[in-house]
Amino acid sequence: MPYKKKKDLPKKVKKTLPKHAQEIYKETYNASEERYKNPKKRRSKSQLKEQASHRTAWGAVKKKYAKKGAKWKSKK
Protein backbone atom coordinates (compact mmCIF):
# COMPACT_ATOMS: atom_id res chain seq x y z
CA MET A 1 0.00 0.00 0.00
CA PRO A 2 1.65 3.26 -1.06
CA TYR A 3 1.97 6.05 1.47
CA LYS A 4 0.21 9.27 0.50
CA LYS A 5 1.56 11.40 3.34
CA LYS A 6 4.43 11.20 5.80
CA LYS A 7 1.91 10.80 8.62
CA ASP A 8 0.93 7.44 7.08
CA LEU A 9 4.45 6.00 7.43
CA PRO A 10 5.18 3.21 9.95
CA LYS A 11 5.70 4.41 13.53
CA LYS A 12 9.35 3.35 13.54
CA VAL A 13 10.06 5.52 10.49
CA LYS A 14 8.20 8.55 11.85
CA LYS A 15 9.78 8.23 15.28
CA THR A 16 13.41 7.72 14.27
CA LEU A 17 14.00 9.50 10.95
CA PRO A 18 14.34 13.25 10.31
CA LYS A 19 11.66 14.81 8.07
CA HIS A 20 13.80 14.77 4.91
CA ALA A 21 14.72 11.12 5.46
CA GLN A 22 11.02 10.32 5.90
CA GLU A 23 10.35 11.90 2.51
CA ILE A 24 13.12 9.80 0.93
CA TYR A 25 11.64 6.68 2.54
CA LYS A 26 8.10 7.48 1.37
CA GLU A 27 9.06 8.26 -2.23
CA THR A 28 11.33 5.23 -2.55
CA TYR A 29 8.80 2.89 -0.96
CA ASN A 30 6.06 4.06 -3.31
CA ALA A 31 8.25 3.65 -6.41
CA SER A 32 9.34 0.20 -5.22
CA GLU A 33 5.74 -0.90 -4.66
CA GLU A 34 5.11 -0.38 -8.36
CA ARG A 35 8.37 -2.03 -9.42
CA TYR A 36 7.99 -5.12 -7.25
CA LYS A 37 4.44 -5.97 -8.32
CA ASN A 38 6.10 -8.51 -10.57
CA PRO A 39 7.58 -11.30 -8.37
CA LYS A 40 10.38 -11.84 -10.90
CA LYS A 41 11.81 -8.44 -9.96
CA ARG A 42 12.20 -9.44 -6.29
CA ARG A 43 15.29 -11.17 -4.87
CA SER A 44 13.22 -14.15 -3.82
CA LYS A 45 9.92 -15.23 -5.30
CA SER A 46 8.68 -15.92 -1.77
CA GLN A 47 9.52 -12.38 -0.65
CA LEU A 48 6.45 -10.19 -0.35
CA LYS A 49 6.16 -6.98 -2.33
CA GLU A 50 5.94 -4.99 0.92
CA GLN A 51 9.10 -6.57 2.31
CA ALA A 52 11.06 -5.75 -0.83
CA SER A 53 9.73 -2.19 -0.83
CA HIS A 54 10.67 -1.60 2.82
CA ARG A 55 14.19 -2.93 2.25
CA THR A 56 14.63 -0.69 -0.77
CA ALA A 57 13.32 2.36 1.11
CA TRP A 58 15.69 1.80 4.03
CA GLY A 59 18.56 1.39 1.57
CA ALA A 60 17.76 4.75 0.00
CA VAL A 61 17.70 6.43 3.41
CA LYS A 62 21.06 4.87 4.31
CA LYS A 63 22.66 6.40 1.20
CA LYS A 64 22.00 9.92 2.57
CA TYR A 65 21.81 9.33 6.34
CA ALA A 66 23.80 7.41 8.92
CA LYS A 67 22.72 6.35 12.38
CA LYS A 68 24.85 8.03 15.05
CA GLY A 69 23.91 6.55 18.40
CA ALA A 70 20.12 6.72 18.59
CA LYS A 71 19.73 9.46 15.93
CA TRP A 72 19.93 9.55 12.15
CA LYS A 73 22.22 12.29 10.81
CA SER A 74 22.77 13.51 7.26
CA LYS A 75 26.04 12.30 5.75
CA LYS A 76 26.68 15.78 4.34
Image (spheres, grey):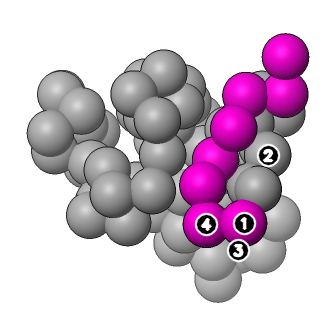
As for residue 44 lying within the magenta part, the answer is no
Give SS at disc 3.
loop
Residue 27, percent from left and from top: 46, 24
Count the marks: 4
Q: Earlier in the sequence, mark 3 or mark 2?
A: 3
Q: Nearer the viewer, mark 3 or mark 2?
A: 2
* Residue stretch rendered in magenta on the structure: 69-76
Tell which tag, 3 or 1, sits nearer the viewer: 1
Left or right, 9 with reference to 45: left
Task: Please name which of the two marks, 3 or 4, marks the residue nearer to the observer.
Answer: 4
Q: Identify residue type, mark 3.
A: Lys
Looking at the rendered structure, the kind of residue marked 4 is Ala
**Residue at which label 4 appears:** 70
Q: Disc 2 designates what residue?
A: 66
Q: CA distance from mark 1 to mark 2?
A: 10 Å
The residue shown at (64%, 47%) is 72
Q: Residue 45's mark?
A: 3
What amino acid type is highlighted by mark number 1? Gly
Position of 22 with respect to 40 (left or right) is: left
Distance of label 4 from label 2 (alpha carbons): 10 Å
Q: Is residue 39 visible?
A: no
Secondary structure beneath dot 4 equals: loop
